[in-house]
C-alpha cells in the first residue's frame, strides 16, 4: 500500500516493536500499553518494512540483531521508503543487548534516532514519551509502569505476563 493509514491526533500513539525474542516482545508490549500506546510486533526486519508500508507508526523500537534482515538494514530501507513517499521520518529507536563497541554509532549511521541498551527501563520509557510528544510523566507514574523494580527483573516479567498482556 502506498499511502499507509495515518495516525489521527485522537488515536493512541501507535508503536511498532521489532524484536525476535518473545520475552522482550511481551515486556515491551506490556510497558508501552501501560503508557497508552497501541502496539504491533514484527519479528524480522522484513516484517517491519512490510508493517510500515501498511501502517504509519508514531515510533518504531528496532532490535539491532534480527534474523534475516538486521535492524540497521531494515532502518535504511524504512528511511528510503519515507523519502520516496515524501513522508516525515518516524522516530526509530534502536535496542541492543550487546556490549560490542560501535553498535550505537552504526545504528545512528543507519538512520536510527537513538540506540538504547536493553532492557527497557524507566529512563528509556521517559524518553519514549518525549519522542511521542506526550507530556512528561512524574517519576512516581513511571515507577508504577515499571512496578518499582529494576528493569528486566523476573518479578516484573511475571507481572506483565500475569496481567494478560502478551
Image (spheres, helix red, strand yellow):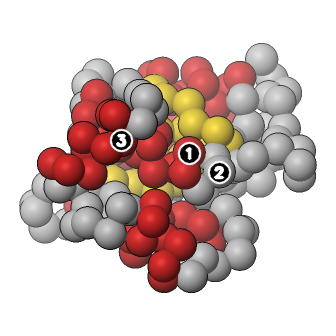
Q: In which quarter of the image is residue 144?
A: bottom left
**Mark closer to the chain start, 1 or 3:** 1
Q: Nearer the viewer, mark 1 or mark 3?
A: 3
116 shown above or below 59: below
Q: Residue 36 shows which numbered tag?
A: 2
- Mark drawn on residue 62: none
Q: Residue 159's image quarter? A: top left
* Image spot of residue 116 (x, y percent): 33, 64
- Circles 1 and 2, Cβ within 8 Å, touching? The answer is yes
Give the side of residue 51 with respect to residue 21, left or right: right
| Position of 144 relative to 110 (above/below) | below
Horizontally, residue 75 falls left or right of residue 14, namely left
Q: Name the residue under label 1.
A: 33
Q: In this orientation, which residue lies closer to the viewer: 58 or 25? A: 25
- Seen at 36% across and 61% down, the residue is 147
On the image, the x and y values in percent for residue 118 come to: 25, 57
Tell me, yes or no, if residue 130 can be seen here.
Answer: yes
Q: In the rendered image, which quarter contains the N terminus?
A: top right
Regarding mark 1 in the picture, which secondary structure is present there? helix
Q: Name the residue under label 3.
A: 160
Choose the circle earlier in sequence order: 3 or 2: 2
Crowding around mark 1 (Cα neighbors within 10 Å: few <14, some 14 to 19, many 20+) is some
- Image spot of residue 51 (x, y percent): 60, 25
| Image marks 3 and 2: residues in contact by CB distance under 8 Å | no
Q: Distance between the residues labelled 1 and 2?
A: 5 Å
Quote the CA–CA distance across marks 1 and 3: 11 Å
* CB contact under 8 Å: marks 1 and 3: no
Q: Mark 3 or mark 2, which is nearer to you?
A: 3
Q: In which quarter of the image is the C terminus?
A: top left
Residue in the image at 20% along x and 50% along y = 155
Q: Is residue 96 above or below residue 122?
A: above
Amino acid at each position: 500500500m502506498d499511502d499507509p493509514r495515518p495516525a489521527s491526533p485522537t488515536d493512541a500513539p501507535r508503536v511498532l516493536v521489532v524484536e525476535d525474542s518473545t520475552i522482550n516482545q511481551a515486556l515491551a508490549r506490556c510497558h508501552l500499553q501501560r503508557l497508552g500506546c497501541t502496539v504491533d510486533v514484527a519479528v524480522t526486519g522484513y516484517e517491519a518494512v512490510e508493517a510500515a508500508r501498511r501502517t504509519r507508526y508514531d515510533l518504531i523500537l528496532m532490535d539491532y540483531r534480527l534474523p534475516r534482515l538486521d535492524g540497521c538494514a531494515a532502518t535504511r530501507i524504512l528511511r528510503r521508503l519515507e523519502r520516496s513517499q515524501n513522508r516525515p521520518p518516524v522516530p526509530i529507536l534502536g535496542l541492543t543487548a550487546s556490549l560490542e563497541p560501535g553498535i550505537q554509532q552504526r545504528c545512528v549511521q543507519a538512520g536510527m534516532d537513538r540506540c538504547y541498551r536493553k532492557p527497557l527501563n524507566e529512563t528509556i520509557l521517559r524518553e519514549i514519551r518525549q519522542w511521542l510528544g506526550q507530556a512528561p510523566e512524574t517519576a512516581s507514574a513511571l515507577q508504577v509502569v515499571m512496578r518499582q523494580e529494576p528493569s528486566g527483573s523476573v518479578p516484573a516479567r511475571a507481572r506483565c505476563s500475569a496481567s494478560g498482556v502478551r
